[in-house]
Image (spheres, helix red, strand yellow):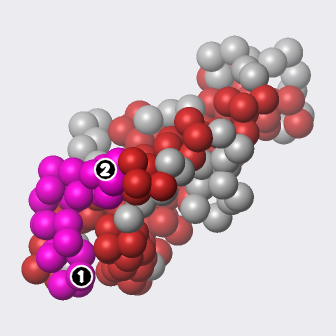
Amino acid sequence: MCRETLDGIRNHSWSRPAPATPEGEVVSWADRIAYVCHDFEDAVATGVVTPDQLPDLVRSRCGITRREQLAAFIYGMIDASASTGRIGMVAPQAEALAAFRRFNYDHIYLRPASRAQGAAVINMLRALVEHYSAHPTLLPDAPDADAGDPHVVHAAVAYVGGMTDRFACRQAVTLLEWPIEQLPHGIDTPV
């Protein structure tokens, strides 16, 4: 990959410096917009929050459906870029996006149930890595090394890290006899 592409990948997060290219900046904004809108939609679908809980600022400027929100934020970017010649977002939508993000953190990501579920997921993934590290022949591309060898551990981490949520849950139940009631909520895990 070229330097510009790598920079865009590396700096797409809210907590990183702005990407060096306009294309990278567009991707960074798109990532931010998609995360807040989709995470909110998922939280509404699972009953974690309701649309009327959104701050008035967000509802009045961007609506309550994902479609309305995406449109408002995208047009906010188009308007800013057209009027300034720079990648960005007009102030009303930028303020709404910041308020939306704060709302998601307060009501979705950092609520006690979410933190507890996050800890449970980490425990399950660690247990899977430990299991595959102890049984390297179960790895698809098993390194020629003994259980616990750093190469085996690396392969186990890579394998578990590449699993879908559903597959990881199925593997935990099948290989580790993981209690179904300890699986993450909201993931359809036919076993």
- Label 2 element class: helix
Residue 53 quadrant: bottom left
Give whichever of discs 1 and 2 has the lower sequence position. 1
Which residue is depicted at the point 86% across and 29% down? 151
Q: Is residue 32 above or below residue 114?
A: above
Which residue position is annotated with label 2?
A: 74
In magenta segment, residue 71: yes
Q: Is residue 179 above or below residue 54?
A: above
Which residue is depicted at the point 48% across and 66% down? 118
Place of residue 65 in the rendered image (x, y in percent of width and height, measured from the top left): 13, 59
Place of residue 162 in the rendered image (x, y in percent of width and height, measured from the top left): 56, 32
Amino acid carrying label 1: it is Leu
What's the magenta region? 55-79
Frontmost residue, 43 versus 103: 103
Tell me the quarter of the image containing the C terminus: top left
- Label 1 element class: helix
Frontmost residue, 115 versus 110: 110
Residue 51 quadrant: bottom left
Q: Is residue 131 above or below residue 186?
A: above
Amino acid carrying label 2: it is Ile
Which residue is depicted at the point 20% across and 72% down? 61
Which residue is depicted at the point 72% across and 39% down? 7
Place of residue 185 in the rendered image (x, y in percent of width and height, measured from the top left): 29, 60
Tell me the quarter of the image containing the N terminus: top right
Place of residue 117 in the rendered image (x, y in percent of width and height, measured from the top left): 42, 68
Which residue position is annotated with label 1?
A: 57
